Amino acid sequence: MRFDVTIFPENLNTAADLARAVEDHGFAGLWTSETAHNPFLPLTHAAAATQRILLGTAIAVAFPRSPMVTAQIAWDLAEQSNGRFALGLGTQVKPHIEKRFATPWAAPTPRLREYIESLRAIWANFQTNKPLRYLGEHYKFTLMTPFFKPNPIEHPEIPIYIAGVNEHLCRLAGEMCQGFHVHPFHTVRYLRELIIPNIEQGAAKSGRARQDCALSCAIFVVTGNNADETAQNKLAIKSQIAFYASTPSYSSVLELHGLGELHVQLNELSRQGRWFEMGELISDDLLNEFAVVAPIDELADAVKARYTGLLDRVGYYMPFTPSDADKAVMWKKAAETFA
C-alpha cells in the first residue's frame, strides 16, 4: 500500500514548492483535483520540480473536454514527467455538467467507455501514426494531419483512473482502466460487498485480474493534537459525510447499511438550505464506519490496519500543507508508516 497526498495550490507559483515538499517527505504520489482551479496546470510545475513521485488528477471532469483536448494534455504531461503521469477522470453529476459546464448530459458509463476508447485511439495515432478512426455514438474521430500530431514519446502507455461510487463504473474500471478512485464516502463493507466484486467482474470480462486495477482513495480521517482539535475535526467530517449522504448519486452506500431513510432526511434538509443541522444526524457509530478516528500519532497505523488488502493507494481527505506545523507529526508518521 502506498501513501499519496493531494495539493490545492491557490497560486500556481507555489505548485513547484509543494511538489518538492511531497517528494522530500517520501510520499509516493501527488494528486490534484478539479475544484476551484484547473487540475492539470499544477502538474506541469510538479513534473518539472520532481523526479520520483506519481503525478495525477483525482479527478479531472471528463465530459466538458473533448477527448482530443484531454489526450493532448495527458500526452504532454506524460512526456514532461518521464512517464509518471496518471490521468484520473470523473463524470460529475448531471446538474453540474448541464448547469455549471453547459455541456449536454448522457448516460455516464457508456459515454465514459467511449471517452477512454477515444483517448487510446488518439494516443495510438500519436505514437505509431496508426490512422485515426474511432466511430462511437458520442465521439467520432477521423482526422489527424501531421501539423497537429505530436511526436512519439518514451512512455506512451498512460494509466487511466476513473472515479465512481456505483457498480457500473466499478465494472468499467476493472475492465478497461489501470486504477479506480474510490470515493471518500464509503465504508469497508461497501468496499468488500460492492466495489471490489464489481471491479473483479469487470476485470474478468477482459481477462484481467483485480490487481490490474489499483484502488486509490483519499480517506475521511478524524484526528488532532488535543481533544479540542479532535472535536472540531469530528464536527467537520460529520458535516462532510452528511453532505455526501444527502446526494442521490451516493444513496446506495447508505442503502447497503439499511439507512435509506437517513438519505431522505438529509436530502430534505439540503433542499431547505439547513446545512448546519445535517451533521447532527451523523452519529459517532456512523462516523466510525465512514472515517478512521485515531490520535494524530496513531492515525497512519489505523489507516493501514483498516485498508490493508482492500486499497492499493491511500491518502487523507485533506490538502497537504507542509507549512502547517500542527500537522507535521501526522504527515511525518504517514510517510514513515507507508514507506
Image: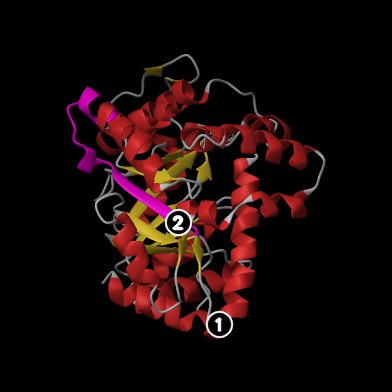
> Dividing the picture into quarters, in which one does residue 244 lie?
top right
- Note whether residue 247 is visible: no
- Note whether residue 294 is visible: yes
Q: Earlier in the sequence, mark 2 or mark 1?
A: 2
> Dividing the picture into quarters, in which one does residue 126 lie?
top left
> Residue farthest to the right?
272
Task: Residue 142: give x, y in percent of width and height.
Answer: 42, 20
Q: For the residue labelled by badge 2, is the local secondary structure a helix, a strand or a loop?
A: strand
Q: Which residues are magenta?
A: 202-220
Q: Which of the pair 204/27 is nearer the observer?
A: 204
Q: Amino acid at mark 2?
A: Ala
Task: Indicate the quadrant containing the C terminus: top left, top right, bottom left or bottom right.
Answer: bottom left
What residue is at 46 percent from the left and 34 percent from the top? Answer: 256
What residue is at 36 percent from the left and 66 percent from the top? Answer: 302
Task: Residue 30: give x, y in percent of width and height.
Answer: 41, 62
Q: Which mark is residue 226?
A: 1
Is residue 328 highlighted in magenta? no
Instruction: Judge the density around disc 2: few (<14), some (14-19), many (≥20) Cα neighbours within 10 Å.
Output: many
